[in-house]
Amino acid sequence: MKIIISPAKQMQVDADTFDVLSTPALLDKAIQIEKYLKSLTVDELRKLWHTNDKLFELNMDRLRKMDLKNEIQTPAILAFCGLQYQYMAPDLFTDNALEYIQEHLRILSSFYGVLRPFDGVVPYRLEMKAKAHVNGTKNLHAFWNDSWFNVLTQDDNLIINLASKMYASQVSRYIKNTKIKMVSCVFGYYHPTKHKVIQDNTYAKMARGEMVRYMAENQIQDFHKLINFNDLGYEYSPDFSDENNLIFLRDRNQEIHR
C-alpha cells in the first residue's frame, strides 16, 4: 500500500531534526528540470513562477545555489510547510510511525517526482500547472509521463489517495486496464440546496495531514479501517462513499479545533 499526498509551495531547510536516509527515486529527471530552469532568462522565470518580488528573489537565489547532489538537504517530510504538514506534525511521530511513513507514504512533487519521507531534497519553486517545457515537452504532465505511476506500483497494487486532483491525476490516468486499485479519501460537507458533497480545500488539507498521522500512529495496513477516522469533526459517510471513494463529512458550521 502506498499513500500519496501533495507537496506544499512553502519550503524550509531543516538538517537537524531528522537524518536524510534515502535518495529520490527519480533524481535524474529532477536534474533535467534543474538544468531547464537554469537555462531560462529572468523574465522567463518570472513568468513561470508568478510570484511577488520578494518570493521571486528568494527563489532566484535558491536556483543559483541549487546543487541537487551536494547541497545541504532536508528530509522531504520536513521540507514542506503547508497546512497538511502542520497538522500531520511528523516531528512528533514515534519511531514506529516514522518507519511506517517511510515505507508507505509518498509525496508527489512536480520537481522531484515521487518522494519518500526521508529522501533528501532542497527548496524549489515549481507548480505542476507551470508552463515548463523540459526537454521540449508540452508541460510537466507530459515530462513526467507514467514515471510516477511506475514508481508507486513497482511493489504495490493499492494506492490511498490523499493528494489534490492536480497531482493525483498524474497517477490515476494510468490505472485503467491495470490491476492497480486507487482509493481516494474525500473531505467535505453536504450542501442541502445543491444536493451534493462540496470539498472544502482548507479544511481538507488539515484532514489529509491528520489522516496520515492517524494511519501512522495506528499502523494501518487494511484500508477498510480508514472509515474509523473521525478527527476535526469529520465522520465517514457510507451513503456517499463507494468502493473507490471514502467520503468524510463535517458540519459546515462547526468550528474546527485541533
Image: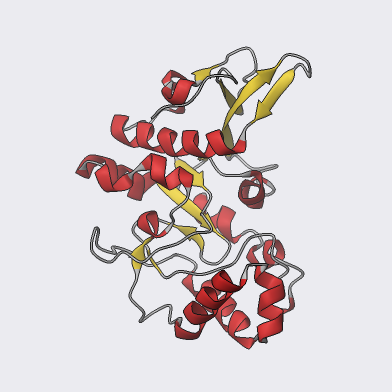
Instruction: Specify whether residue 238 is in view.
Output: yes
Instruction: Specify whether residue 117 is in view.
Output: no
Q: Position of residue 237 (x, y in %)?
A: 57, 15
Q: Quadrant of the C terminus?
A: top left
Residue 233's place in the image compared with 239, above or below, is: below
Quarter of the image holding residue 220? top left
Residue 160's place in the image compared with 21, above or below, is: above
11 and 30: which is toward the camera: 11
Q: Quadrant of the N terminus?
A: top left
Horizontal side, residue 61 vs residue 243: left or right: left
Residue 113's place in the image compared with 191, above or below, is: below
158 and 102: which is toward the camera: 102
Q: How is the image coloured?
A: secondary structure
Q: Kindly give the residue lying farthest to the left in the view shown.
A: 95
Q: Position of residue 137 (x, y in %)?
A: 74, 73
Report the number of numbered marks: 0
| Residue at horizontal 64 percent and vertical 43 percent from the top | 178
Horizontal side, residue 196 vs residue 228: left or right: right
Quarter of the image holding residue 131? bottom right
55 and 216: which is toward the camera: 55
| Residue at horizontal 24 percent and vertical 58 percent from the top | 17
Q: Position of residue 74 (x, y in %)?
A: 34, 65
Q: Position of residue 217 (x, y in %)?
A: 29, 33
| Residue at horizontal 60 percent and vertical 39 percent from the top | 179
